[in-house]
Amino acid sequence: MGRYIVRRTLFAIPTLIVISLIIFAILDLAPGDPTSQLPLTIPSEIREQIRENLGLNDPFLIKWLKWMQLMFINEPLNMIDSLFGTCIGDCEARGRIISWSSRAPAMDIIWQRLPQTLWVLGIAFVLGIVIAIPIGMYSAYKQYSAFDNVGTFVTMVGYSVPVFFTGVLAILIFSVWLGWFPSFYTTTHVVDWTSWDSIWFQVEQMIMPVTVLSLFNAAALSRFTRASVLDNLNQDYVRTARSKGLQEKRVVITHVMRNSMIPVVTLIALQVPGIFAGAIITEQIFRINGLGQLLIVSIGQSDVPMVQTLTFMFAVLIVVFNLVADVTYGVMDPRIRYD
Amino acid sequence: MAATQERVEEQRGLQTPGSGQEHRSLRQDVWRQFKKHKGAVVGLVLLAFIVLATIFGPLLYGVDPYAVDTSMTNAPPSAGHVFGTDNLGRDVLARVLVGGRISLAVGFVAMLFGLVLGTGIGVISGFFRKLDGPLMRVTDLFLALPILPLLLVIIMLWREPLREAFGEELGIFLLVVFIIGVTSWMQTARVVRGDVLSLKEEEFVLAANSIGTRKRNVIMRHILPNTMSPVMVSAALGVAVAIITESALSFLGLGFPASFPTWGRLLFDGTNYLQLSPLRAIVPGVLISLTVMSVNYIGDGLRDALDPRLRSK
Amino acid sequence: MKRTRLLALLAVLAMVVAACGGESEGTTTTGAEEPGASTTEAPPDTSDTTAPPAAEGGNLLLLQWQAPSQANPYLSTGTKDLLAGSLVVEALAEYDPEGNVVAALAAEVPSAENGGISEDQTQITWTLQEGLLWSDGTPVTSDDVVFSWEYCSDEATGCASSSFQNVTSVEAVDDLTVTVTFNSPQPYPFVPFVGYGSPIIQRAQFADCVGEAANACTEQNFAPIGTGPFMVTELRPEDTVLYAANPNYRGAANGQPAFDTVEIKGGGDAEATARSVLEIGEADYAWNLQVAPEILEPMEAAGNGSVYVNFTSSVEAIRLNQTDPAGDPPSEFQGEATAPTGGTHPVFYQNEVVAQALSMAINREELTAIGYGSTGLPTCTFWPVRDEGTTSFDDWCLTQDIEGANALLEENGYVDSDGDGIRETPDGIPMSFSYATSTNAVRQSFQDLIAVYWEQIGVEANMSNSDAGLFFDGTCASDDCIWKFFRDIQMYTNSSIGPDAASYFLGFLCDQIPTSANSWGGENLDRYCSEEYDAAYAAFAGMALDDPGRVAAIQELQDMVLAHTVIPLVNRGTVSAFSNAIQGVGTLNGWDSEYWNVEQWTRSEG
């Protein structure tokens, strides 16, 4: 088991390096430029100077290597320093990746925003799973029953209607017409767990985005669960278990569910890139200033270091989730481990 | 021996060249099972209707989707304009019908592109052991790429050059189709590879090899036809994904330009007018949803129909 | 089975812990140490300075759909940053909504009478008010003014402000007096240290941030110490800025500012912010509402807020290329500065007939109604400021006259000889032109409409649009940029930086033409060049500010350019929305920060 994990982790590193090269290459070819955001009256010599200062004129390989050093060495060191209060090496003068529009370290801004995205995404994700799995299982168990047909229809609708459509409708209905929930998300709200008001405020502003996202997740997931459970229900071992006289509940929950979960877990992990994509759209609609919104704004401002770092962070998160899925898969399915 | 062989083939739904097809053909079998799935049938009918509507609708309806009429902006539905007009007086239904052509075209072509790519890579990867490793690593790499961020970035960067090279329409069409195709082949490749790996061990393949059939013919005549089931299911789902991705890109303002009434673009333009003229956004939104739903149902039906275990019940 | 449950539980726990843990990190405010969160430290303790409590208190919620990236105006990447900074730092003087100069930190506005402006117009002397304090309690001195100039003029800093372009030196005469010296006589010296792009910053705070070090000074850039009514307590780039009232503000004795805290919240788009203020009533102010009029007007009808419009010099206009984009090299001015030879546009060069006909065919009322509603005014000039905007074109250009345009063209030999619906010039050149603008719904609808108007007078326009990032890209990385003007016609909005005509009309001089040789730098994008204009401009520039002939001179200059180069369409107003509960705003200020008088804003009860 340990060797399996180590092997998988080691493979992740060259993947990330290649991904960083791809991201870097794509962005380096960008025709846009940060000084285009500046007032038109600034003379071109000053613009050229600014561009020089931002390191725009260095050759590609140099830029990539510099960025790699910053991303893979300096930033982790910085993170360790701030987490543990240490000072490794030349901690004052250590270079950071600097955003062009805010002149602040890109990782700091990303770190600041991570909670926003995780609150909404994470809860929607978990909620989606919690809703989807029981529904999927029961649909499969009672295949072609009324529950199944209705359930399938509802999940089909949930899966097919684009998130941005339902999101926009939700805002119209619940914020504008009914006035129940705020139409934007306040990122600076600190949840005081002892105050009911404070908690309710956070809940209020999260209800719409979380509901919209989790319904979408649940729809996709329950269909997969249903398919996976169906596959297993027809297997011989289920017949054997029943003929042994085991309680139906035992058969389903102990045996079928466990085996069905294996591909579902893999699928959940593969859903993650899609969930981040959904986050980008949801954040735009509900004005949650998280990582997705930051990406879009930075692209619009041609803030290349921020876009590079952010895209790379997305890739890291995806790779990490894939890793977790692989390990979980290995834990759940003993056949995989010993290869 | 022969009887066992036939039963095995039947059970696996395999189509060996020259197999006796006296009592029922595979195609009829699949169609019968497909028809049992009510949702899939409805989906097929609905999809056919939508496709026909977008092809022939503009000709039958006769209203110019591009005609600007500033005296009739944001008009409610009327005899001349079945769904009303937008803020420049253009007819909503006409634009939706024409937009459907583009959206569906993007959906199908992008899906085809991804399918060909995915199947090709999957087959090669499964068949040629030496290429398996590197190709699967490439697949993993693509799976780890953050798709939407890269999509956004690529579109922002390459929109202008492509437009200059191929002209406005073709340029952006190629870009969107290419991007969707290139980022959605991985699933198909993995599934096809798995199928090919198990097919390679089948006796009829071994037989073909032993009589010296060239590799290319083995692939084309034996392997490929038998991987059709996962491929077809992928195709159905691929269309759905492509249509949604195109709408999402348009919604973020990065899809087709303003002069192109794709459903996604119409939805994007219409969201700000939801209170003023709701039909303008609701109609394309509903159409996207219906199309995707039909395609998903068809995919479901296909999956059930092509699953030999269900069929032989 | 148990293992699965355990795994699932762990996963959920991990998620919750990450979310909760992350939440607390991101929302601390002053001074706490946490992993890399780029929050700011409050300025040093000022508890020893007592100030009377604000009259009403409460929070002011301002929505800027383009969120500020940082708060140092000298490093701004757009108006959003200038606005964020304007609540905190101030300049010596500011512009009021009419474009007049009004004293802010200075005791009074210098002029020739009070000896503030030297006779040869090369020097201006400012005197600070007495007793001004920074928000950290230290006094403001002329040394800070000198430093502000040093900071911005150091090229390595990457200062975004061009207000010190013509300044050779800034010297402190005494603790409260400063003399600014220009490199040449400046008829309008109110550019450096006037307006929200040119504020006074504190030497003590920014001393180590000059030059290349500017980028590393995140704390200073996020929370500059200023003299304004508020101080930054937290800045999250592209998201929110939080402010608290400045106890050392010079108006504190009068209960200014009325609000305890301010929040600038970014994100979303113009429609969403308009909806928040006007329809839902969730916020107090929304900035820069580029929203279609038929959407904006019903929102206002909800009764929670009102739309404010201020008209300055932003004019959306059609520009006719005076050089030939099909020439070799394209659109490059060739020949002497006084008399262009070759490379001139085969149709538009100094062609008053065509320009007039094209202008007459346009229905400006319709364009304005569709594109801007009440937030735009049809206009016949590109300088509709104060009373300086009248030209001889006013009497005919506001009414669409297709017949008149057709007649004008026919009379002058522009006929359609081959019957294809497109006229040809007397030299046989078909009147078919390339017409580009940026990608934007309103601009595309203008293109659609104008194409139809011109079709009726036998002129064909081949419309195209480019992404705004490329169209307005000052580096001209793509051929679509407006400085290159590689087409016959382009359309966009131009506006002046300040409320004075001199700097704006400078942009039509022959030596201001952008070419490949000067990397497309230069403001004369239309390549207009005329000896007469250059001479008239020189005469105008020499006039004193109170010269009665100044207005006539400006009108004369406008007439020259309008004759064959610029076809103005709509004067676009600055549009913002205020909640009806906010009082004291007055007229919306289009020349300076829209928050210029925020210390006077109050919230009415009920």
Image: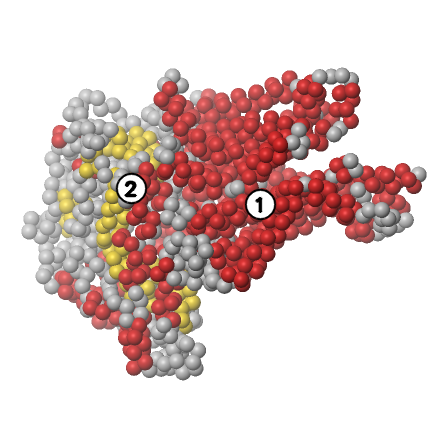
Quadrant of the frame with the C terminus of chain A: top right
Q: Which mark is residue C302?
A: 2
The mark found on residue C51 in the picture is: none
Q: Find residue C48 and report its image quarter.
A: top left
Q: Nearer the viewer, residue C517 or B159?
A: B159
| Alpha-carbon span between mark 1 and mark 2 | 37 Å
Left or right of B232: which side holds C150?
left
Query: SS at mark 1?
Result: helix
Number of numbered discs overlaid on the protein picture: 2
Q: Which residue is mark 1?
A: B292
Looking at the image, which residue is at 42% across and 54% down? B77
- Evaluate whether residue B256 shows in this view: yes
Image marks 1 and 2: residues in contact by CB distance under 8 Å: no
Horizontal and vertical percent for residue A251?
71, 20
Q: Along the line of sight, which residue is nearer the eye, C222 or C84?
A: C84
Q: Locate residue A73, reporting x and y percent.
A: 52, 32
Q: Is C270 located above or below residue B256 in the figure?
A: above
